Amino acid sequence: MVADAEFTSYYGRPILKGPVWKVPDVPTYLYAGGLAGSSALMAAMAEATGRPGLRRVGRLAAAAAAAAGTGALVHDLGRPERFLNMLRVVKPTSPLSVGSWILAPFGGLSAAAAASELTGRLPGLGRLAGLGSAALGAPLTTYTAVLLANTAVPAWHEAHPELPFVFAGSALASGGGVGLAVAPAAETGPARRMLLVGAAVELGASQRMEHRLGLVGEPYRTGRPGALLRAGRLLTAAAAVGAMAGACAGPLTRPDRPPGRLGPARRAGVAGRLGVARRAGAAVPGGLAGRGGVAGLLGVAGRAGMAGRAGGAGRGGVVGRLGVAGRRGGRGRADALVRSARALDRLSGVLANAGALCTRFGIFTAGQVSAADPKYTVVPQRQRLTDRESAAPASEHPSRE
């Protein structure tokens, strides 16, 4: 028996031709495309629920991310006309052709929606452009995963069942993070939910992908790509924890309702002040004599130092001053809580986007590593051949005599 050959190359050449895409152009494009698509979806949800501040943030983020992603892609291609050449034909069986026809109209629609938002002109057309970019947003967040999985690169191709979910979850987390960090505090509910759902989907899918792939999943766990992906998971998990902590403080500090509506605390405060005014007004016609309660409520007697003459009114003034001080102290603590919760939301948004960026760079680098090492190509091929031979009937096996 001849020992199995150790394949390292054919005639001094690698078994696979590695990806020719540049770093950081293509990983940045992968991140920017996901952020743009999820931001457009967030803007559409904000439009439907009457949150103008969140809608504005989503539209501007979608347009800016689409422009940045297109710029990174054109820089990778080397010449702008090469991107235009990809639009000459439509080939449904090619993820690259389909992706080009997703990105091009999305960029135009998101730019139109952002321009309408900034200028206030043609709001109807801006609304239609926003809906169109939202319709293209979902495929924009996942087509890049299909594009990678459609190659012969082992770490990408073998991960085709989970890779779209990893990209979709990461995109939702990044878009929700932008809304959570920048939008008005009272309108961040949808952005917070997007971040939490996206983080759960991304972490679950990436964990399953790495464990299912076995040997081919080794680049996702070791070396530089493994470090990037671990950092991405930690950052995403920290962002989710921060968003949940902010949600716990939300009912007290940031009621998630459109502006202009009064929360329970404000309604109670208004009612209390109106009640004081009514009681004071009712007491005045009855004369001030013996109506120390009126002076106490208004704090007049207490402040004038007329405790001796006013009797109970003086005590009422003290109570009035204490009540005012208590309310001022409560407002100070509430303001501090609002500032802390807002800072936590901003930090969570930054962490979510940093995690998404690390995830894209880690997955791209893992593909490069798996293409450069022949074992990730040869060993799985041999295993598949062995499995087919063992599953076939004995009569179909080639004779070894």
Image (tube, rainbow, N blue to C red):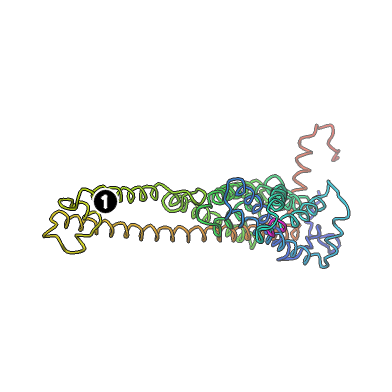
Label 1: which secondary element: helix
Q: Is residue 354 left or right of residue 27?
A: left
Q: Is residue 380 above or below residue 373?
A: above
- Residue 265 spot, x, y in % from top left: 38, 49
- Residue 166 spot, x, y in % from top left: 65, 50
Name the residue beneath numbered marker 1.
280
Question: Residue at 79% of width from left, 38% of height from top?
Answer: 389
Would you say residue 384 is visible in this rendering?
Answer: yes
Q: Main secondary structure of the magenta part?
A: helix
Question: Residue at 70% of width from left, 44% of height from top?
Answer: 161
Query: Given the image, on which type of amino acid does mark 1 rest?
Result: Ala
| The furthest residue to the right | 88
Q: Is residue 188 left or right of residue 392?
A: left
Pick the front one: 26 or 393: 26
Would you say residue 222 is visible in this rendering?
Answer: no
Find the magenta span and give its range.
111-115
Residue 112 sits inside the magenta stretch: yes
Image quadrant of residue 355? bottom right
Pick the front one: 400 or 20: 20
